Amino acid sequence: MARYLVACDAGGTMTDVIVVDERGRFVIGKAPTTRYDESVGYMESLDEALSYLKIGPADRPAFFRGIETAIYTGTSMLNALLNLDGLPTGLLVTRGFEDMIVQGRGSQSFIGYEWSEITHMQYRKHRVPLVPRRLTRGITERIDLFGQIVIPLYEHEVERSVRELLGLGIQALAVVFLQSFTNSAHEQRAAEIARRVIRESGKKVPVVISSEVAPTLREISRANATVIQAYASEPARKQLVQVEEKLKAAGYAHSLKTVLSYGGVTSIRYPRLFETVMSGPVGGMMGAAYVAQVIGEQNVVCSDVGGTSFDAGAITAGIVPIDREPPFQQMYVNVPMLDIRSIGAGTGTYIRLDPDTHRIKLGPDSAGGTPGPVFQETGNDEIPTVNDCNLLLGILNPDYYLGGRVKVNPAKSLRVFREKIADPLRLDPYVAAEQCVNLVNVIMREHLVRSLMVGHDLRDYVLLGYGGGGPLHLLGYAGDAPWKAVITVPHAGAFSAWGGACMDYAHRRHKSVSAVFAGREAWREPAKSVTAAWQELEEELLKELLQEGFSRDQIELEQIAYMRYFGQLSDVEVSSPVSRLRGDAEVEQLIARFEEVFTQMFTLAGRPPQPTYHVAEVSVVAKVDTVKPKLARHRLEGKKPPRAASKGTRKVFQKGRWHVAQLFEMGELRPGNEIDGLAVIEAPNTTLFVPHDWHVRIDEHLIYWLDRRSPGKSRSARSAAARRAIRGGRR
Amino acid sequence: MQRKAITKSGARSGLKRARAGHPAAGGTLRQKLETNERLLRETGHLFGLEKLRRKETDPGTYEAVWQILLNICNTAHVVGCRVSSSPIAAEGGDALWSLHLPTGEAVCTSRGIVSHPGLLSLLLRSYIESGYEDNPGIRPGDIFENNDPHFGGIHSADFQTTVPIFAGGKLIAWAASVTHVMDAGFVLPGSIGFMNPDCFSDGVPVVAERVGENDRFYPWYEKRMRSRTRVPDWTMGDARGRLAGCLTIRERVLALVEKYGLDFFEDVSREYIEDSRRYAVSRVRTQATPGRIRKSNFKDLAMAGKRVLLPQQNVDCLFNLPLELTIDRSAKVAISLRGASGWVPFGENITPNALVSGMLNAYSHMVGFDMFNWGAVAAWRLEDPPLGSWANPYSANYFAASGVAWAPAVVWMSSLYEAFGRLYWSRGFVEEVAAGGATTMTAEFSGVNQYGLYTAGLTLEQACNGGPARAIADGETSAWCIYTPNADFGNAEVSELYYPVVYLGRNLEPDSGGYGKFRGGLGHTAVWLVKNTSGIEYQCGCAGIRSKVCGNHGMFGAYPTWPDRAAYASGTNLKELAEAHRPLLHERGDPERPTIGKDIKAEVIEPNCIAPFVTPGQLHEWDVIVHPVSGSQALGDPLERDLELIRKDLDDGLERERIASEVHGVVAHFDEKTKHWSLDAAATQKKREAMRAQRKARGVPFREWWQREREKILVKENMAEAVLAMWRSSMQLSPAYADELRAFWKLPDNFGF
């Protein structure tokens, strides 16, 4: 019987499903996301994928029986937070902090704002609290930063508060006490009392405590994470179970898996389901990590151009970046997530002129899929978008937009763009359109080069572009930055779903510590505390994974320290070269690794002359390798694309005038083919635009290598040299 | 491996590129400065740019390069804050990096504390005016620094670092930065030096001087910081952060110049500034009604009878903070402080330059910006504040202290909110109206910390309180700070890492946003239990507070919130109460009946200390401090407040029933079972009508009131010495204001206070 892996990425608009067979071959289906019941959209998308595999109704039972792993990345938890339809949740907090959730912190009121919006006080707005003040109770207790009990837990207040909250109809209870990550005794005891009171009431109310959810510093972020777990995880799990039931009814024999925000796969019955709260962009970066392995590269910048946003993250030394306190839904949360930075720039981004200054303004809002660009004739008659420019410039094919499924009206784009942008600027519409596209490319490049890559040398990094608009803008935003190489893949349009299938089964735990490495003679105690924390986290993780049926020898552990110079507030992630700090030699290795990373990021000016080192948090990642889709290796064919790939020519406006561009059908190109710009390579779900001075070579894995043409050197020789350099780890 | 970006070798390569030549290529900087001023005078446009040529011919690249510059400055902010070690810079964001023209004007700034780009611009200008081109010379790799208000600083806790950027031997720009350090070496520990009597107590001076070369600080600079500030590791961490950010700007600007060409860079840098000026003018023209508006405002500093440093400080001071805003037909804005009272023997005097920079901050809040830089400064004219006043002290007292010069300025800036707000209202832009801002009462600790080491520093509590009421909604709670839009107070657990205290509370302070149709955003109250220390001092400081008077009282008939108060108790029985599981202390409670005296016993209980003050001695374990931070101001008649808003505030514990009844005139009931409040609409209407009738009965015709008040003035009835002194100095320093005052009240020509 054939074996399959099925992975799904249910986004806000579309649900993508990828089916991978045992040889690593894959097909991708797409369908609209159905928020009322995500299993509907999931099955429709799967149906489309099966149609590509030519699996008809008669073969479906065998197919579903053959699914070895089904992975689902959905938006159900996010929706619970957006629609405020999670469980009515009660909250016990340290007395005096009853307003913690309502109050939040100031910076939560401007998450994601532009600078000019941040300074404009009228825009300030906190989100609607997930737990209203009337469902919050303060409990007298205090533990200090050293974990010492300063004020004992007033147990009678816990009992009374839980009874009151049950009377008010809560269906979940969260407990957040200050400094509980250093000593969880009060939270544990409060939970015991709460569970007893709940039991006595005959109700079923889950109790969630912050020291188990996220045992790390910063009570507001820890409280937000704990409340999300209490409020949204069970409704989300219900949706996941619905998907699983549909699959099982069709013959699937195993449990459904879902994706963790920090990149990894876990069972939908995973207790800390809040860690899956932001899994949308994860697939892309994890897919990129896999592509990086295939091409033998350690440093990859992942860039995803969608209709509304540009998401980017950098894999360094093979490590996917983690943000331990990311902003999420106008909250800061102690939920480790992949560090993916987004800006409001995509193919659907609106283009306007500022009425006061006549400056070109791109977004940050966008037309998205609906109403879409002006040319789409689905409601946007007023504001041109980036894709309207791409169409005017001849880069997009009016007869092949989304594979020809969407009708396009270029005349309307031209009329609206001329009226709203070009005429007021007193520019030719095509010149103005090119300037707008160049501007969005610069904004994307700046996002990568300056915001994301602070302290990193671009020459060490391969730039990977994906997303529906990735190949369209990739070479524009790659620009003349000195990337080690620039690549994309033919399945860029559904890369996130594909990446979802590329993940290991992985769990991750963090813990705050305070280990100060001053004089060498005083290294022993802090070294012991770091080692003890690693061991504690390892034991927790091993227990979880062993319970999920993995054997110890399948599990790989990675120790991480978050280090800083003593006195600093920010730290850097250091993947420890040693698994234990048993003696000075191991501490030295850890410090050496830290200093290497720090000076690379923050210049030597940031290094104190006689430094003391501080580890404020540690983490352990436990991974289990899983079956993944393969980028199959093909036999290289000739440089010249086959006749079937050629689609003729089209005029494209570049650098102020019209040029003739070669057109190709991406699906017909073969490994080994090479194409010089100016060219447009089209596929139903994406378009690769190759400007004049760029060259494309397709390798044996169907990865597209894009490099600048330079006089005096054969293109293929340069491309091959770049690849050899990468494989050999050289420049 | 040779790195291009910001590594040491990269920095060196930038330095090497920059060597050779003289900064004055193409004329001296002083000549350029004079030319710029002449062109502005003659054309009304900065740099004489009647046309923005680059923008018009190549708008896409114009925008693209702006985006690059913005990212360069923000990258510097990331680098600098992460290198900096102080909680204020790194956690509170009280820092900024910026790019300037060779003549000083800010071109582009990072996020951060927007009060400073104006000052940094004027500091750079002061180098030129002082002839630094020739002596000591400006060379690649130089580091200049300042914190002295006499030469372009605001107060010495704000350290300003500037680094010249050379290309081909020509000075093409400056990188600059400012951070607020934790301790500035004032006479008392900390960085809010309200108690400083004169500039000799204003902390370690760095006087617009070269403090390093070849991208490194001089060793004697570091030695000075180590011996003259109390927490030098934080001070030097900030210094390194400022420098690292500046070097980041320098290297990346040089790369940008290589790509786009020096001519293009120089052209667009100037165009961005002129564009910004045009934007500010355009915004005012679009949404404000032209005309003249005045706002009276007062701030006090009640220090009589408290612990002070010098005998002459044993006084109450009252500041007159008048604002006159005029918008002419061409949308030019003129601002005057005519009538400002005299300098004070505390660290609360500010220079006109700093006030210009503060105005830039307030302008960014109320007028907005498209490109934040020096341009907006040319969109208004600030009349020189009266010589010898708190806003221009040096002509009368060159040694006036400026330890926390922002203090009167932030209260004065709040008037600008209301002045613009009224002009927007009259034009119909009601969404843009904002009542006055909250005050900023600070808390500083000094003494032995929980690690057994000496510490001194400022908490972030005041850095985030309520936003002003809007004409369409309540102000947002815990979301704004008048002197930094990066408003945030961080996490209590982070504060506990730095100070030997354990938080017993940090809830919102009910009723702290004034009373009106729309209330201001609320402040909050920190309750600290002193712990893990052999003794600390607590300073309840003034970065813009009201001791006894209500200066900003809200708009359109709103009532003000109460003045700033704090409380403490020492020698308490809290330990015994905790062991017996008895009620402790977690809130301030009703300001008229503070909770601190309710459940605990102590050797000393001070339930309602008038801010600011310094505790008479050290506090010890189990002593407790109650530190409320005010909310913002309200807007509109409190009797017009929507019942649902009141009900919600009652439900959320953000308003006391007493206030709902006595101020908003509602009749409310609490349901013990559902824990919900309900309001009786009919009874409320009746009650409100009765309250309106009472108001009417109290009212008198204006002329009658005027006559009564005039008589009081003539005999100086019930006027404290602080009041008399304020009016005396106001009239003395501004004769025209004195004439106007006498004319309004029909006082004798020789009348004085």
Image (cartoon, grey):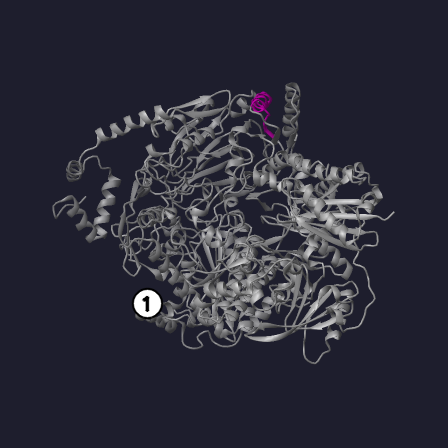
Q: What is the magenta range? A: A149-167
The furthest residue to the bottom: A712
- Element type where label 1 sits in the image: loop
**Can you give x and y, in whole percent of width and height, for residue A512 in the image?**
65, 41
Instruction: Give A352 or B546, whichever is nearer the viewer.
Output: A352
Asked if the stretch drawn in magenta spans residue B607, the answer is no
Q: Quadrant of residue B302?
A: top left
Instruction: Give B737 or B427, whichever is nearer the viewer.
Output: B427
The residue carrying mark 1 is B44
Task: Look at 71% across and 58% down and name the residue there.
Answer: A491
Q: Quadrant of residue A325?
A: top right
Residue B91 falls left or right of residue B398:
right
Q: Is residue B348 visible?
A: no
**Can you give x and y, in whole percent of width and height, for residue A725 in the image?**
75, 68
Q: Most prominent secondary structure in the magenta stretch?
A: helix
**Can you give x and y, in whole percent of width and height, for residue B283 in the image?**
37, 57
Check disc 1 and give the amino acid type. Gly
Which chain does the residue under circle 1 lie in? B
Residue B85 falls left or right of residue A528:
left
Task: Look at 25% across and 30% down and name the residue there.
Answer: B695
- A583 relative to A140, above or below: below
The furthest residue to the top: A200
- B20 relative to B459, above or below: below
* Quadrant of the snapshot with the C terminus of chain A: bottom right
Asked if the stretch drawn in magenta spans residue A151, the answer is yes
Instruction: Give B295 or B637, whichever is nearer the viewer.
Output: B637
Q: Quadrant of residue A189?
A: top right
**Can you give x and y, in whole percent of width and height, for residue B461 in the image?**
47, 41
